[in-house]
Amino acid sequence: MDAKIEVDGAGRRSAANACTEPCAIERGMRIIGGKWTGSILWHVKDGPVRFNDLARMIDGASKKMITERLRQLEDQGLVRREVCETAPITVVYEITDFGRTALGFLDELRKWSEGLPKALIPEKR
Amino acid sequence: MDAKIEVDGAGRRSAANACTEPCAIERGMRIIGGKWTGSILWHVKDGPVRFNDLARMIDGASKKMITERLRQLEDQGLVRREVCETAPITVVYEITDFGRTALGFLDELRKWSEGLPKALIPEKR
DNA sequence: CAGAATCCAACCGGATACTG
DNA sequence: CAGTATCCGGTTGGATTCTG
């Protein structure tokens, strides 16, 4: 599956036959690496969350961004949107079974991140 | 550590006391979620790799981007840069012990991504 | 080989105002 | 409440050229 990588005596890999399509890491990042995407998925993982609550939970993200990312996550089947016919209307978002398959690495990321010195974290990406 | 989240009868969380600073997921993404950052770290994980080889391995990324991300990873202590006084000069990059602590997450991400249908992957993030 | 420098179009994403 | 619409400045990042 992976391209075979040559290794010389010094332990260096040549790129003679490196991957010509995005590697798995990059493919994954295209799904989950969008701005706020990981945070959103993380915050809907334990049950339905209302739109405005979500927006408040994810400090720094505008409603516009939340909406865009939610639509994308919905299209990809990671998150489900449900309209509650209350008055006024409410909408809740919840992780899907497929979305749950991403929680493994998200939790690894969380564990890793919690040990990080604050000074290391950039203001923005 | 996390803000305490209220849960009502319907299982919804309120944002009354949601996190006011970036949550762990977001903090981690600021380190590892930059464009090409994950891929670069992944490709230097098994030993020293030369700059141009790295650039060829990561298809789609320009040398400018590779350089910028490498500098950032170096500043954060995830990657080490080493100059070999050959002629012409060569430079190799290698993961550090600290960088290795991120591999758990990256490998989980890789495993997840390998199972994804190609149709789901966006052209860009 | 390993970059640095420059240019600039495209996109991102925040702010604001508006809607059903 | 849960968005949509529009504006628009700032940043991103690719292309290209140049260098020690």
Image (cartoon, coloured by chain):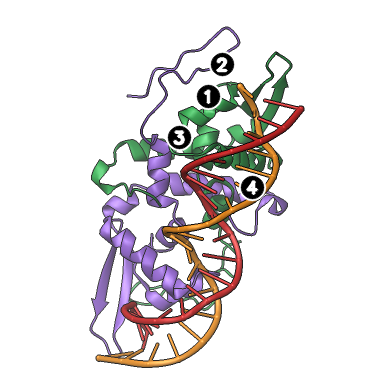
Chain colours: A green, B purple, C red, D orange
Q: Name the residue under label 1.
A: A53
Q: Are marks 4 and 3 on the same chain?
A: no
Q: Which residue type carries mark 3? A: Asp
Q: In the rendered view, would you say A86 is above or below B32?
A: above
The answer for which chain carries disc 4 is B
Q: Which mark is residue B115?
A: 4
Give the residue number, with chain letter if any, for mark 3. Answer: A107
Q: Residue B38 or B94: which is nearer the viewer?
A: B38
| Neighbour tally class for label 4: few under 14, some 14-19, many 20 plus, Cα within 10 Å | few
Q: Disc 2 residue type? A: Arg
Estimate the spatial distance between the alpha carbons at disc 1 and disc 2, rounded to whole Å.
9 Å
> Image height check: is B46 above or below B55?
above
Q: Nearer the viewer, mark 4 or mark 2?
A: 2
Q: In this view, does A116 lie to the left or right of A107?
A: left
Label 1 sits on what residue type? Asp
Q: Are marks 1 and 4 on the same chain?
A: no
- The CA span between labels 4 and 2 is 31 Å
Observer able to see residue A6: no
**Placement of B9 over or under A73, stated as above or below:** above
Location of the N terminus of chain A by quadrant is bottom right
Q: Mark 1–mark 2 contact, CB under 8 Å?
A: yes
User: Which residue occupies 25% across, 77% down?
Assistant: B83
Classify mark 1: helix, strand or loop.
helix
Q: How far apart are marks 2 and 3 (CA)?
A: 21 Å
Count residues near mark 1 (Cα–Cα under 10 Å), then give few for <14, some for 14-19, many for 20+: some
Same chain under badges 2 and 3? The reply is no
